[in-house]
Image (cartoon, rainbow, N blue to C red):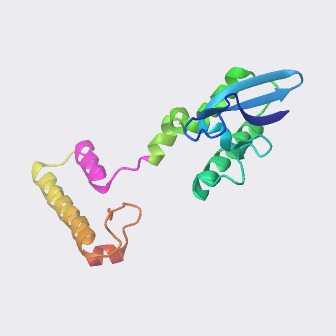
């Protein structure tokens, strides 16, 4: 099994504007699958041996060269690490799509873990789910507004805390004392 990256397009010698799609090829036991990726490069800057930018390309920043070369190697590693005997062109296309659009393949549990609710959302959920009298609900809302004002105060007055938000898991006695 061998995975490689290649281009299908060529360009004139001094053409610095055209872009070519980078394809990935998987060869295994006589099978040969080729799938296009969303990565692009100028054909004059492509090195087939390195499967990335040529060393002496002066028009492109080093960060851009390193980023593209790393992306190509990451896709190759992804394909190699997930390889099994029953692969086909659809599988290869899915692997490349997984690299470019990872959120598309996340489960609902993974998405729920990533989108952690804010303190205010948790308090609103608490007020909805628990049976409380109207007076107690109003009391909780007063506390919630005080905490939101504290968030705004910290954002406005403390350096490096422009995106401060109360986190239910990070509230300590020091935070309560500061309030």
Q: Is residue 127 above or below residue 11?
A: below
Q: Residue furthest right?
A: 29
Q: Is 68 colored magenta in this rendering?
A: no
Q: Nearer the viewer, residue 104 or 119?
A: 104
Q: Nearer the viewer, residue 165 or 96?
A: 96
Residue 130 image position (x, y, % from top left): 25, 46
- Magenta stretch: helix, strand or loop mostly: helix
Image quarter for residue 172?
bottom left
Is residue 69 visible to us here?
yes
Residue 67 image position (x, y, % from top left): 61, 51
Image quarter for residue 81?
top right
- On the rendered image, what quadrant is the C terminus found in? bottom left
Residue 11 image position (x, y, % from top left): 65, 33
Q: Residue at x 27, y 43 (%)?
A: 129
Is residue 87 visible to us here?
no
Q: Residue at x 16, y 56 (%)?
A: 141
Q: Is residue 106 above or below residue 85?
A: below
Residue 158 image position (x, y, % from top left): 29, 76
Residues in magenta, as a range: 115-130
- On the rendered image, what quadrant is the N terminus found in? top right
């Amino acid at each position: 099994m061998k995975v490689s990256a290649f281009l299908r397009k060529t360009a004139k010698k001094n053409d610095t504007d055209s872009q070519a799609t980078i394809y990935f090829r998987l060869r295994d036991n006589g099978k040969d699958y080729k799938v296009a990726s969303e990565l692009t490069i100028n054909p004059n800057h492509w090195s087939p041996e390195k499967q990335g930018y040529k060393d002496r390309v002066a028009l492109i920043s080093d960060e851009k060269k390193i980023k593209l070369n790393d992306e190509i190697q990451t896709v190759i590693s992804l394909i190699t690490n997930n390889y099994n005997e029953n692969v086909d062109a659809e599988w290869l296309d899915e692997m490349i799509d997984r690299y470019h659009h990872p959120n598309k393949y996340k489960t609902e549990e993974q998405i729920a873990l990533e989108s952690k609710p804010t303190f205010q959302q948790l308090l609103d959920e608490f007020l909805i789910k628990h049976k409380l009298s109207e007076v107690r609900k109003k009391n909780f809302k007063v506390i919630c507004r005080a905490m939101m004002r504290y968030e705004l105060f910290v954002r406005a007055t403390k350096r490096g805390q422009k995106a401060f938000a109360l986190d239910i898991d990070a509230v300590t006695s020091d935070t309560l004392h500061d309030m």
